[in-house]
Each structure stands twice: as C-alpha cells, then as structure tokens.
Image (cartoon, grey):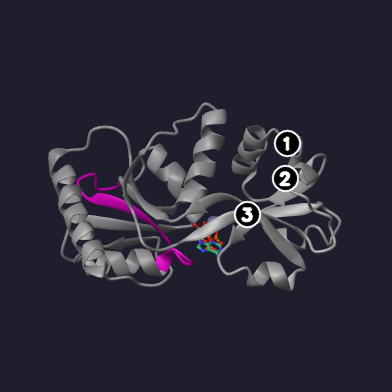
Amino acid sequence: MTDNNRLRIAVQKSGRLCEGSMELLKAIGVKLSIRDRLLIAHSTNLPIDLLRVRDDDIPGLVMDGVVDLGFIGENELEEKMLERRAADKQHQYDVLERLDFGGCRLSIAVPNEMPYQGIASLAGTKIATTYPYLLERYFREQKIDAKAVMLNGSVEVAPRAGLADAICDLVSTGATLEANGLEEKEVIFRSKAVLIQRRGELPQTKQQLIDKLLTRINGVMQAKE
Ligand code: ATP
Ligand code: ZN
C-alpha cells in the first residue's frame, strides 16, 4: 500500500531534467537517500516520496492524481495535455512555478537543399515529430495543410531516410540539426521546466508542506537573479 500522507513528487529518472530537479530539491532542504535504479526514493527529513520515472509519464501521473507534484518540461506537458483532452481524459493541472532550467525550443527544421520561402513552403509536406499535437495545433493556427508523422526516436534522420520532408524537434544549440544537414526555420514552442500540482483539494498538512516548499523555491530562484 502507498502511504497517502506523504507528499508524492514525480521527477525524471535520468535525462535533461534530472539534474535541475534534484539540485532544486536539495537547495530547498529535501534530503534524500537515493539508491540508483529504485523507482521510489524517500526523503529522510520530510514526509516526501520521489517517484523516479520517464518524463513522458509525469504529466499523466499528475493529471490522474497519482502524484501530487511533478517536475516536467512545458513541451511534454502541453503535448500530453492536448493528447489527453482529445481522448476525453483528465487533463487539468496547476503550474506552481516556471523554473530556470530545461530551456529549449520546439522548431521546424528542413533539409539544407529544400527551397524554403516561409511556412507556406510546408504546404503538402510530411513532418516527422514526437510532438504531433503541438505541431498540428501550429498547422491549424498558421492555416497550413501539412501532415505530422509521429516518430518516438531518430526524428532528425527521418528526411534522409525518406520518411518525411522535414522535422519538428527540440533544439537547444542546433548542433544536432547541423550534423544532420537540417536548418531551423520556425520556432513553434518555447519551453522550460515547470513544477506542477494535481487538481483538487489536498489534505491540509500536504498543502502546507507544498506552500513551504514553494516559498523556499522562490527564495532560491530570487537568490540566483
Ligand atoms: P526519458 O527517458 O525520461 O523519456 P527523454 O529522452 O524523453 O527522457 P530528455 O532528452 O532527457 O528526455 O529531455 C527531457 C526534457 O528536457 C525535454 O522534454 C525538454 O523539456 C528538456 N530539454 C532541454 N533541452 C533539450 C534539448 N536540447 N533536447 C531535448 N530536450 C531538451
Ligand atoms: Zn521522454
């Protein structure tokens, strides 16, 4: 049985959000005994359990109320929200804080040799992406008739492999794009990590703990400014 009195926070187990999330938890005084490979880490000084999962699972865990808080990139959060809304599943959450790590942008990039005169050039194309809901929303807003092709990995090689005409992927420096002969053309979403809370009333002690953590997060963020 899970202990419902302890605050449950979902964090990425390993990857680009992991270090920032763990550093922030440490900075606000959450002490942990993490043994690698364990799904759950218990705090040794506060009634908090960390659930260490793939980032893709975090929005759903919060929206289904399985965990109380989660650290997640806005790109993944918004994509999963759109996906769940389309499927008539719970898709509500509250953003407690926009954080200062995990910055990246979701961009459309086209092969160097593709003639490009603006987004109208994308009409009739297939674009490979891991974020079909965000991309299709962009197509609708821009009134472009193009197709999102879902790929969970190797998005950047899709044009060369003949699977798509262009791609829509996360970019931070652009080095991966360049290495694959692609040129960034349109930024469709700018993202940072956020701390989110599940909807619905929490037991008072849990909410008080969240408020305390949030005050400390604000303090840590202000000290960095
Ligand atoms: P997981 O195994 O947890 O599913 P992943 O491969 O999906 O990991 P990461 O590459 O670790 O995920 O990226 C997690 C998040 O980090 C992204 O969704 C995004 O919010 C953020 N991020 C920041 N910079 C980048 C970048 N250059 N490329 C990809 N993601 C980035
Ligand atoms: Zn992921």
Q: Callout 1: few (<14), some (14-19), or many (20+) C-alpha neighbours within 10 Å?
A: some
Residue type of the residue flagged with mark 3: Ser
Q: Which residues are magenta?
A: 1-18
Quarter placement of the C terminus? bottom left
Nearest the eye: 87 or 222:
222
| Residue highlighted by disc 3 | 107
What's the distance in space between the residues labelled 2 and 3, CA to CA?
12 Å
Q: Earlier in the sequence, mark 1 or mark 2?
A: 2
Which residue is found at the position 32% from the left and 58% from the top? 50
- Relative to 32, say whether 114 is above or below: above
Local secondary structure at mark 2:
helix
| Residue highlighted by disc 2 | 119
Local secondary structure at mark 3:
strand
| Residue highlighted by disc 1 | 144
Q: For residue 5: magenta? A: yes
Q: Are marks 1 and 2 in contact (CB under 8 Å)?
A: yes
Q: Is mark 3 within 8 Å of ligand 1?
A: no
Residue type of the residue flagged with mark 1: Ile
Q: Earlier in the sequence, mark 2 or mark 3?
A: 3
Judge from the rendering whether residue 71 lies leftward or rightward of residue 187; answer left or right. Answer: left
Q: Earlier in the sequence, mark 1 or mark 3?
A: 3
Q: Is residue 103 visible?
A: yes
Which residue is found at the position 45% from the left and 34% from the top? 91
Q: Position of residue 73 (x, y in %)?
A: 46, 54
What's the distance in space between the residues labelled 1 and 2, CA to CA?
8 Å
Q: Position of residue 115 (x, y in %)?
A: 84, 55
Nearest the eye: 127 or 116:
116
What's the distance in space between the residues labelled 1 and 3, CA to CA?
16 Å
Local secondary structure at mark 1:
loop
Q: Callout 3: few (<14), some (14-19), or many (20+) C-alpha neighbours within 10 Å?
A: many
